[in-house]
Amino acid sequence: MTKRVFLLGVGCQKGGTTWVHDHLNRHPQCALGIAKEYHSFDVVASQQQRHLLTRSMKRLRVNLDMAEPLLKDGPPVALGDGAGLLADADLREKLLRNLRKVLFALDPHDYASYFRHLSEGEGVRVTGDITPEYAVLGAEDYGFIRRLMEDAAPDLEMRVLFMMRDPIERIFSSEKMSCRRLGQSEEAAARSTVKHYKKPYNAPKSRFEETIRHIEAVFPPERIMYVFYEEFFAERSVAGLYEFLGLDPLIEPDFGHNPLPSGKTETLLPAEGIAEMRAYFAPTYEFVAERFGAERIRGIWQHY
């Protein structure tokens, strides 16, 4: 019997995790639940806030369990004044997703119970949480998640997927996403990359050597899969993921939208900016090259 798996996707941000989630979410042997990113462990209420929220937590759990089938599948619910509640299906889904996220952040045991329940569905082999921000967690955090899942769902085997991308390219892609939301150009994103690459919302997510050390302090090698964004979008790479997770090749990967970089980075980022960032991330480049092979990394990471 194939072992059922809880997949913890820990990044990296802008490293292909959305594509992986969307693909697995279409697979009939996967049940990933109501969200791609649950953020249950990178966003934690402070102790001061926690005691103020504890009283409402039990009420929220009961109400959500009662309301979810109706909100998800039933007709619009009427409020006391007769107005339709959440007639829009997309809005209903967002409500459920956000309520679950809040509940999981408040009580990790609900998080574990939720995924245990998903894994018990007919034909399900894989469930999981793919949250890129988990890349900045420490070994203590990964250890907590492992113990949590093993205690709550001993029949699930926890496996970790970590996707990496050229550190400078990763930050540039993140800045482009932010600038697009603001209606700004790629040139503006290039300037922002050079200006903000050291910021705490950028640099730690490109320190892959730290993520790898923390993961390997908690999980054995056979439970970890490392992937490079620049190599991933090919049938053999997806086949490797299937093998790692114990999935049958039941669906075709959709490579119609090529997420790989267009090669314009060097014309957008100033040479002095690239040199500065390359020096700053030198420990990361050298660690990854030593670990996975300098020739391999030189062939896929343009700034190595």
Image: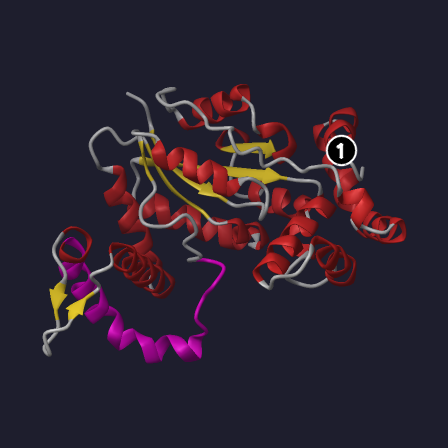
* Quarter where residue 25 is shown: top left
* Percent of width and height locating residue 295: 78, 25
Residue 157 seen from this side: no
180 or 200, nearer to the observer: 180
Residue 118, visible in the rendered structure: yes
- The quarter of the rendered structure image containing the C terminus is top right
Decide: is 206 above or below 188: above
The segment highlighted magenta reads 41-69
- Residue 22 lies in quadrant: top left
Q: Residue at x 29, y 56 (%)?
A: 110
Magenta stretch: includes residue 61: yes
Q: Is residue 25 magenta?
A: no
Give the prevailing secondary structure in the magenta stretch: helix
Residue 80 located left or right of residue 144: left
> Which residue is painted at 86% across and 53% down in the image?
276
| Amino acid type, callout 1 | Ala
**Which residue was labeled with disc 1?**
289
Residue at 52 percent across and 45 percent down: it is 10
